[in-house]
Image (tube, grey):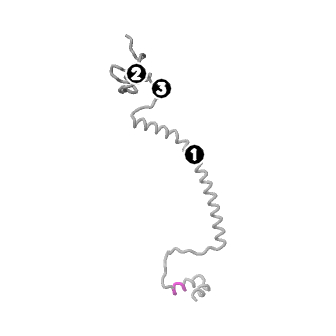
């Protein structure tokens, strides 16, 4: 009965009828209405347009991230190397190392071409055995 009366009313008269006959008025309530066919078609068009635009942006982002990673790589490698050096308090080098056996002290000494002692450790039992090539001739 009330729905039939509402259908015939428009504008101010509808508002007056609703205010007069309401038991409660809910301000700022969120509610949903059924979409019309035109609204559904427009929403689907908007979804398609947004999907295309988002795909293009994702593609641009992917290209940018690849370039970003390439640009950051030398800095990351440098940071990693420097952090490792600071952590170990040593610099990594590659070159010729000379292994010297000091039978008097019972030690193995590793020295580079510049005379820097790389390693200085005790001889293992197998290293203490003398062969004819290690005998010093006075």
The x and y percentages for residue 126 are 39, 25
Looking at the rendered structure, the secondary structure element under dot 2 is strand
Select label 3 or label 1 by which is in front: 3
**Badge 2: few (under 14), some or many (20 or more) residues near its Cα, within 10 Å?**
few
Question: Circle 2 sits on which residue?
Answer: 100
Residue at the extreme left: 105
Q: State how far apart marks 2 and 3 are (Cα).
A: 16 Å
Task: Classify 4 as above or below 134.
Answer: below
- Earlier in the chain: of badge 2 and badge 1, it is 1
Say which residue appears at 66% left-offset and 68% top-offset.
41
Q: Which mark is residue 66?
A: 1
**Badge 3: few (under 14), some or many (20 or more) residues near its Cα, within 10 Å?**
few
- Check if mark 2's residue and mark 3's residue have beta carbons within 8 Å: no
Q: Nearer the viewer, residue 135 or 41?
A: 135
Say which residue appears at 52% left-offset and 87% top-offset.
21
Q: Quadrant of the N terminus?
A: bottom right
Q: Nearer the viewer, residue 112 or 46?
A: 112
- Check if mark 3's residue and mark 1's residue have beta carbons within 8 Å: no
Task: Classify 99 as above or below 47.
Answer: above
Question: Magenta segment: does it hold 137?
Answer: no
Q: State how far apart marks 2 and 1 are (Cα).
A: 50 Å
Range of magenta residues:
16-21
Question: Circle 3 sits on which residue?
Answer: 95
Determine whether, in the image, residue 98 is placed left or right of residue 34.
Answer: left
Most common SS among magenta residues: helix
- The mark total stands at 3
Determine whether, in the image, residue 24 is placed left or right of residue 8.
Answer: left
């Amino acid at each position: 009965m009330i729905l039939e009366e509402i259908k015939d009313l428009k504008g101010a008269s509808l508002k007056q009828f609703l205010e007069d006959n309401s038991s409660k008025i809910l301000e700022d309530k969120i509610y949903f209405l059924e979409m019309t066919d035109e609204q559904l078609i427009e929403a689907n068009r908007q979804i398609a347009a947004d999907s295309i635009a988002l795909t293009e942006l994702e593609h641009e982002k992917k290209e940018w991230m690849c370039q970003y990673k390439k640009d950051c790589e030398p800095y990351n490698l440098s940071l990693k190397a420097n952090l490792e050096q600071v952590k170990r308090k040593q610099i990594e080098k590659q070159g010729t190392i000379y292994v010297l056996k000091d039978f008097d002290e019972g030690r193995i000494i590793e020295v580079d071409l510049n005379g820097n002692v790389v390693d200085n450790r005790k001889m293992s039992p197998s290293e203490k055995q003398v062969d004819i090539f290690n005998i010093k001739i006075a």
